[in-house]
Image (tube, grey):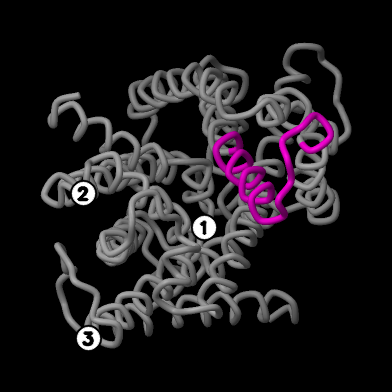
Amino acid sequence: MSTPNKLFGGILLIAGTTIGAGMLALPVVTGFAGFYPSVLLFLLFWVFMTFTAFLMLEVALWMPPHTNLVTMARNTLGHWGEVTSWLVFLFLLYSLTTAYLAGGGPLFNELIQSISGYTTPEWVGALPLLFIFGFFVYKGTRSVDYVNRLLMAGLVITYVLLVVFLTPHVNAKLLDHIAWAHLILATSIVATSFGFHIIIPSLVSYFDRDVPTLRRAILIGSAIPLVIYIMWEFLTLGIIPLEGPHGISEGYAQGANGAHLLTVLLGNSAIAQVARFFSLFAIITSFLGVSLSLSDFLADGFKIEKTRQGRLLLYVLTFLPPFLITLYDPRAFLSALEYAGAFGVMILLGLLPALMVWRGRYTLHFPSTFKAPGGKIALIGVVLFSLSIIALEIFNKARTLYGN
């Protein structure tokens, strides 16, 4: 494959890994602050996450081909780094799988109701994801790949249609709302929405360690979601009111997503149907990728053979805990994404890359073909920023728990 084609493929891999169901939650958590503060928050996290991606790239280039994140942590930070990355990676994947089950349930219930006229119990909505699309995860990577191609095509088509159809409905006055203090609610989910670092070791092998091409792929591939998110904010926050029935406040309290609020506000129009299918495509594609990664991670971690019995055990281990959490927590979609962003993404994709680079550069003195800019000051800044986001989320959860 020629270099331009490989570059294009790498850009799409990064953009596709970044854009997921977390995008649906963005309007609900950023709407309190407003459109313009949200755009600045997106820019901040794009810069931060792109820089930590370059840190991850530096570490990956120290390692032999086909090295995964857990091995990278072990080779730089030792046993504690390996254990920490293993546990946090597992926590992140379980949190995201929970979020997608919780987010997909109401959408499937709405679809069933629109087709049949019957209202189904809330827990029924998660069953199509578990038994239809979970079956592809049970079958393995090849089955997931085939169905994911069709779903990705649907995702692109419905997003383009939404941009075309929703733009005339945007009320510019709704975009003028600004409340900077409320950005604290959005930080963890915005962090989740810009994470793609776990595929960097694979990209290093894919590009044969071609550093200039890797740098371009990371910059361009991460910038595409930034543009898409800003356009999505413009459309949703320009249509969904902050207060009132089916507004941002009600959606946040119920754990709903932005596309769901759009479908309710727009009624049974064709635009609402497009928004509903866009939501389903976004959640299912994310669900397939994350749950497949979780299943493979469990198989490797617990040394489970992929026989018929082994795959059945992996299916239960992958899906039963997230399903039980969705039954317990009615706003599990937002809650799981918040936990994933604050404690999964900020540790795994913020703290760990900085600590690995620090030890690899200044203690182990690994020879390098690429060095992320900034030196020790930049690494300290990454650590402090990551710890600050984690502390903010702990503060948010404590305030919610005690009703303040």
- Measure the C-alpha gap from mark 2 to mark 3: 25 Å
Q: Which mark is residue 233?
A: none
Give the main secondary structure, helix, strand or loop, of the magenta stretch: helix
In the image shown, does 279 or 385 lie closer to the viewer?
385
Precedes in sequence: disc 2 or disc 1: 1
**Location of residue 371 with respect to 78 vertically, above or below:** above
The kind of secondary structure element at disc 3 is helix
**Location of residue 375 with respect to 330 vertically, above or below:** below
Which circle, 2 or 1, is nearer the viewer?
2
Magenta segment boundaries in residue numbering: 287-310
Q: Is residue 126 visible?
A: yes
Question: Mark 2 is on which residue type?
Answer: Arg
Whether residue 375 sits left or right of residue 222 in the image: it is left
Whether residue 398 sits left or right of residue 225 in the image: it is right
Question: Mark 3 is on which residue type?
Answer: Lys
Q: Position of residue 305 (x, y in %)?
A: 73, 40
Q: Which residue is labeled 2 in the image?
A: 209
Q: Residue at x 67, y 54 (%)?
A: 94
Q: Which mark is residue 29?
A: 1
Q: Which residue is labeled 3 in the image?
A: 376
